[in-house]
Image: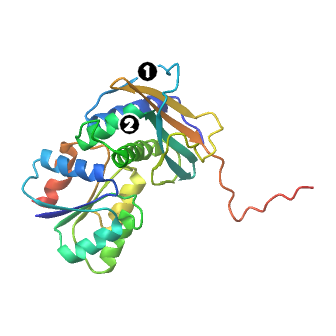
Amino acid sequence: MHILVVDDSRAMRMIVIRTLRQAGFEGHQISEAADGREAFEAVKDTRPDLVLSDWNMPNMTGIELLSALRRSGDETPFGFVTSEGSAEMREWAERAGALFLIAKPFNPDTFRDALLPVMA
Amino acid sequence: MTLDPKDLAEIEEIARDVWSSLLGLEITVAQAPDACPEEVVTAVVTVSGDAHGVVGVQTSGAGARAMAAAMFMMGADEVGEAEVADALGELTNVVGGNVKGLLPGSNRLSLPTVLDAGVEDPRDLTQPPLAEVFLICDGEPVLIALHALAAVPSAATPERIPS
């Protein structure tokens, strides 16, 4: 499986990738993008099987990325990993077509719970 | 914008969770330090919407380097300014996102800004903080503060003409 990790923080991309491994999701191809715009191009070019995206990023936010992908007819499975986990944000994410929203801070169990149904 | 006193305990809990899960470091509540560290690094995020304020995380230069080193899994002497800014900005973003959840109404969070040492915070922080939590991580002080900002007048609000 190919997973695209999108976050404007290089530190957070490292932590997400590390947590994926700690959660038992090893041996997958992981690529990275630093904002929504870069991720949009990466999805079109490299066809990942799953996008794990931050919400709040410069140039193009995570929710703008998800909307742009769906508008273009792209149905790549998409989940958020974001610092804001309010009911309002979760509802917004779900309405836009996200499969899950993992709120930061997180741990490997949180990743397992959210990703296992998607990766099965 | 108001904050319930029990929210202070929530902010302490947020800090413990964030430092533990993102850095693998323990952070504990401490007394306000007697003196400000010589080198200070501050990052802020703005909350705007029904509430209007700034969440800031401030630590010493050594504290910021230690946190960046933990986040990037590098030695403290190996981290540069980019790693420090990224790490402190992201910590502030996560703390801010969680503190935003304590505030009433619908709000947006800005991207984090890391303020250079010696450069004054451009925001108006003259009001006393709504909440201020002093912590200590690996012997270095950490301050998390929430300041209310004056609401930005809406375009629909006519300016008062001085008589």
Q: Which residue is drawn at 31% across and 62% down?
A: A34
Local SS, label 1: loop
Q: Marks 1/2: CA distance?
A: 17 Å
| Quadrant of the snapshot with the N terminus of chain B | top right
Q: Mark 2 points at which residue?
A: B64
The amino acid pointed to by label 1 is: Ala
Q: Residue at x 30, y 80 (%)?
A: A72
The amino acid pointed to by label 2 is: Ala
Q: Mark 1 points at which residue?
A: B30
Residue A86, horizontal then vertical, whole percent: 40, 50
Label 2 marks a residue whose chain is B
Residue A75 visible in this rendered orientation of the protein: no
Local SS, label 2: helix
Label 1, residues with CA under 10 Å away: few <14, some 14-19, many ≥20: some
Residue A69 image-quadrant placement: bottom left
Single out the residue that lies furthest toward the bottom: A72
Label 1 marks a residue whose chain is B
Left or right of A104? Residue B92 is: right
Left or right of A10? Residue B33 is: right
Residue B84 image-quadrant placement: top left
